[in-house]
Image (cartoon, grey):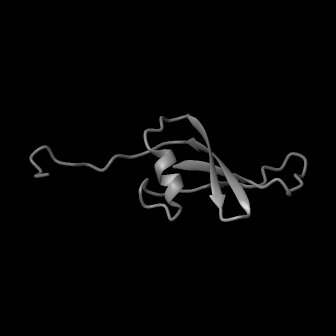
């Protein structure tokens, strides 16, 4: 489960408040933001990545992502590929 922080430069932060943090659970490759899917591949638990995504002519929105944990899909040894 990644913990994601989205950052905009126009936000004023309140002291001792983690504004913008959201724990999200999703399958890598199925997130609705394609550049996040690409940026999350190969992450290790505890790793921090910062991904900037261009939004048209507006600029970029930045995501700070920490992988909290993950589960692998179980594939039986005798399963056909």
Residue 54 rendering spot, x and y as whole percentages:
64, 57
Choose between 58 and 23: the one closer to the eye: 58
Choose between 16 and 4: the one closer to the eye: 4
Residue at 71% over, 64% down: 57
**In the displayed structure image, the side of residue 27 where residue 21 appears, left or right:** right
Q: Is residue 74 above or below residue 42?
A: below
Residue 52 rendering spot, x and y as whole percentages:
64, 49
**In the displayed structure image, the side of residue 53 where residue 78 appears, left or right:** left
Q: Is residue 64 above or below residue 26?
A: above
Badge count = 0
**In the displayed structure image, the side of residue 30 where residue 68 appears, left or right:** right
Choose between 57 and 36: the one closer to the eye: 57
Residue 46 rendering spot, x and y as whole percentages:
55, 34
Residue at 16% over, 47% down: 76
| The quarter of the displayed image where residue 27 is located | bottom left
**In the displayed structure image, the side of residue 35 where residue 8 appears, left or right:** right
Residue at 41% over, 56% down: 29
Farthest front residue? 57
Residue 9 rendering spot, x and y as whole percentages:
82, 53
Residue at 55% over, 48% down: 2
């Amino acid at each position: 489960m990644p913990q994601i922080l989205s950052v905009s430069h126009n936000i004023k932060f309140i002291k001792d408040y983690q504004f913008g943090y959201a724990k999200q659970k999703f399958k890598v490759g199925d997130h609705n933001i394609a550049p996040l899917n690409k940026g999350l591949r190969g992450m290790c638990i505890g790793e921090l990545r910062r991904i900037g995504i261009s939004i048209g002519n507006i600029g970029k929105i930045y995501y700070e992502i920490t992988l909290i944990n993950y589960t692998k899909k179980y594939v039986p040894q005798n399963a056909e590929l």
